[in-house]
Amino acid sequence: MPSTIICKMSNDRSTHRNPKTDLRECAGQGCFLCLESDNQGQYAILVRCRRPTKASHIIGCTRDWDCTSNPKPIYEGTMPWDSACESDDEIYRRLIDTCYQHLGWWKRWLPYFGITEVLEVNFQFAGFVEPDGRYPIRMNPIDLKNVSEECERIIARHPTDPYFDLNDICLNDSQHSEQCLIGMQEWSQPCIKVEAEEAEQRRKRLLFLPHLKECARDPARANGLYTLEGLAQESCIYDIKGSSQVVLPLPYQKFQGTAWMRGIHFILGWQTDRMHIELPFRVSCAWFGVASIWLSLVLWRGVGGDWGTAFAFAQVVAASVAIIVTYVRS
């Protein structure tokens, strides 16, 4: 699990003069939005963002060489794209805009049509980047069963039974089990205890996968949920500048990379879950209103009234029904 990073929000007004140009120049990170269409197949879009992937390292202290007497830490220098951070709300809104930009802006205004599923995926680049910024890919959804089983296996390596042998468990940073020492010294593996704690957190975050869809439908809810840090896998945000930047395909050049990348997959369709919740009440109100209007119209005409008066009475009934429905909904 990536560590939580405290970010300094940028208040520079100059970044709002030309958002597209400034974002391209200032953004040092990017999130891969994976999409699929019948005409273009599977492809990824690099959505630029300002989200440092790691905290700055301490390279010294302001007082005393041994950092005593309440020293203030000195952090390594950062580039402009590592000195500010965007909220999850902002990044999700940009992901949504990019999704509709490629799958059709007009779909955004269809009633009960929108994002139906959001998945964490792995993908590989399948060709060079297209002129419009599309990266052809082959993606696979995360196998949640395998992730859960892997977490269980890692957790099981660190015994928590009260009758454990001290040689079989890691107690702290300086006291490790024999198995852990072999892995750390021979294979440069992390401590078994640390791995078990991270696996426990990963297993817990699997319970919150529905938050992905909720944040995509309502980005304002995203802040504080940390979904962009990754739920079933690590974060899908990569460095695109600096020494740790990710290697990307170039236009009209064969890509030799074989590493699996992490992305977030948006799926559009009819939101039947919303229909089941919202439509029954609305449809029943509509049918009740229509039936009441026509019934009053027929009854008034049937008792000997003229059609003009009947229609006027029906309008009064329609207005009354509208007032009742509005009051109930509020």
Image (tube, rainbow, N blue to C red):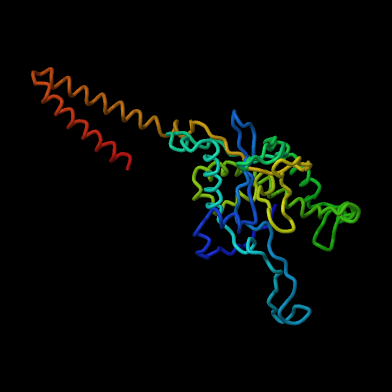
Q: Quadrant of residue 254?
A: top right
- Residue 246 % position (x, y): 72, 50
Q: Residue at x 28, y 41 (%)?
A: 327
Q: Is residue 164 toward the left or the right of residue 119 in the image? A: right
- Residue 259 % position (x, y): 77, 43
Q: Answer yes or no: is residue 289 visible.
A: yes
- Position of 45 relative to 194 (above/below): above
Please state which of residues 239 and 201 is positioned toward the viewer in this rendering.
239
Q: Is residue 299 toward the left or the right of residue 323 in the image? A: left
- Residue 275 % position (x, y): 44, 31
- Position of 55 relative to 297 (above/below): below
Q: Quadrant of residue 128?
A: top right
Which image quarter is the C terminus in?
Answer: top left
Please state which of residues 76 and 189 is positioned toward the viewer in this rendering.
76
- Position of 115 relative to 242 (above/below): above
Please state which of residues 69 and 32 is positioned toward the viewer in this rendering.
32
Q: Residue at x 9, y 21 (%)?
A: 306
Q: Is residue 283 toward the left or the right of residue 28 in the image? A: left
Q: Is residue 145 toward the left or the right of residue 86 in the image? A: right
Q: Quadrant of residue 86?
A: bottom right
Q: Answer yes or no: is residue 144 visible.
A: no
Please state which of residues 138 and 212 is positioned toward the viewer in this rendering.
138
Q: Residue at x 59, y 31 (%)?
A: 37
Farthest residue, direction front = 252
- Residue 218 % position (x, y): 49, 45
